Amino acid sequence: MSGSGRALLFDIDGTLADTDALHLEAFNQVFAPHGHVFDRARASKELMGFSNISISERFLPGHPPERQAAIMAQKEEAFRKLASGQIKPVAGLVKLLAMADSAGVPMVAVTNAPRPNAEMMLAGLKIMHRFKAVIIGDELAHGKPHPLPYLEGLRAAGAAAGHSLAFEDSRSGVQAASAAGIATVGMRTSLGHEDLIAAGAVATAASFDDPELLSLVTLKMDW
């Protein structure tokens, strides 16, 4: 079935691994001196899933672009220090990736995280070799919630939206994948079922070994 236009596309943070708490701690370390402190509910609405450019434009408008970029770099360095050695895959992930590899279904990571973060996480999870491409929102004209990162992911995989599945944990990510025409599973690492469905997810799951998720993947991928 290789070459049939199928693909699995994955967000990274909060989807492959539950890292939202670490990001929240890093944001608060760096943004508190600038007058912004976030709890988990606020972070899920205003930070998680958004690109660094859009975050800095929203919360650091009084700084020139180069200073905004430097502050965001501090936040990402803080996150990498916090995350070092602490990254664990969401249950069932490794088995699902192995199944996709065995079936010849390409996989792509699609994220608004900076490339050093994305590569650190994939390497830490020991799954970098599984992915055909890593698409970075800030390296494109538009990041999530715009569909462009997912459209680029489909292009990299040689896949069709109607034959593919995406996995996301944030509102902006679900919106991006859905707008690209990809059926999207919302992972309930930070948001609940209702929020993810409202954003456009076709189903939700707490882990990758959820029986309903596996049934949906099997049906969509025809393996």
Image (spheres, rainbow, N blue to C red):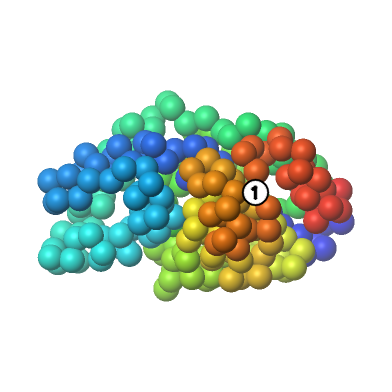
Q: Please tell me which residue is depicted at 72% across the width and 60% down the height of the picture.
A: 164
Q: Nearer the viewer, residue 21 or 129?
A: 21
Q: Quadrant of the N terminus?
A: bottom right
Furthest toward the bottom, the residue is 141
Q: Nearer the viewer, residue 17 or 204?
A: 204
Q: Which residue lies under the disc numbered 1?
A: 204
Is residue 166 visible in the rendered image? The answer is no
Residue 139, percent from left and from top: 41, 64
Dot 1, crowdedness within 10 Å: few (<14), some or many (≥20)?
many
Furthest toward the front, the residue is 194
Q: Please tell me which residue is depicted at 13% across the width and 63% down the height of the picture.
A: 63
Q: Nearer the viewer, residue 216 or 95?
A: 216
Q: Quadrant of residue 77?
A: top left
Reply above or below: 133 against 121.
Answer: below
Three-letter code for the amino acid on which mark 1 is drawn: Thr
Furthest toward the top, the residue is 85
Residue 86, percent from left and from top: 43, 27
Reply above or below: 36 against 152.
Answer: above
Q: Is residue 164 left or right of residue 21?
A: right
Residue 65, percent from left and from top: 19, 66
Q: Please tell me which residue is depicted at 76% across the width and 43% down the height of the picture.
A: 212
Q: Is residue 118 left or right of residue 79?
A: right
Q: Please tell me which residue is depicted at 34% across the width and 50% down the height of the picture.
A: 42
Is residue 176 visible in the rendered image? The answer is yes
Q: Secondary structure at mark 1?
A: strand
Q: Nearer the viewer, residue 49 or 66?
A: 49
Residue 110, percent from left and from top: 54, 56
